[in-house]
Amino acid sequence: MEMENHLREKRQALALSQKQLADLAGITRQAVSALESNQYSPATSVALQLARALDCRVEDLFSIKQGGEIIEGELLGTLPSGTGPVRAPAGVAACAASRTAAQATTRVILGFIEEGSPRPTVAAT
């Protein structure tokens, strides 16, 4: 599993040195440097400390790279106002990828249990 790392960009956008960020987050400058150069993935506690120090979400700093597979879907109903893009969970993508060629036309249908639901239901047919 490959990670995306935006720590350096966030730190530089705030005009902080590695040492300043390290002091704010309660870690060492060497740890900041190692994280920025992708030498290791942070422990949850370190990621949370960095997010707090940079006033952002952990997901703004670190995320799992998305695969290039596109799954076509059909939305049943309407999206609640203010809803961003809807993505199928990785399990659905893996399920679709493992089907035989004859089953390749299978559609993934996205729909809401009820209008205003915060999370869509996903079903492969």
Image: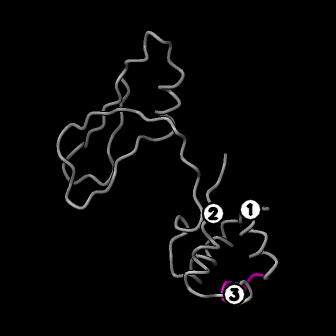
Q: From the image, which quarter does the C terminus lie in? A: top left
Real-space Cα separation, disc 2 to disc 3, in angstroms: 17 Å
Amino acid type of the residue tagged 3 in the rendering: Ser
Q: Residue 23 colored magenta?
A: yes
Quick one: SS at disc 1? loop
Disc ID at residue 38: 1
Image quadrant in which you'd find residue 76: top left
Residue that appears at 78% across and 75% down = 31
- Colour scheme in the image? one colour
Real-space Cα separation, disc 1 to disc 3, in angstroms: 17 Å
Q: Is residue 105 left or right of residue 49?
A: left
Quick one: SS at disc 3? loop
Amino acid type of the residue tagged 2 in the rendering: Asn
Instruction: Name the residue carrying label 2.
Output: 5
Query: Which residues are drawn in magenta?
Result: 22-28
Real-space Cα separation, disc 1 to disc 2, in angstroms: 7 Å
Quick one: SS at disc 2? strand
Residue that appears at 67% across and 85% down = 21
Residue that appears at 75% across and 66% down = 37
User: Are the residues flagged by discs 1 and 2 in contact, CB closer than 8 Å?
Assistant: yes
Neighbourhood count class around disc 3 (C-alpha, 10 Å): few under 14, some 14–19, many 20 upward:
some
Q: From the image, which quarter does the N terminus lie in? A: top right
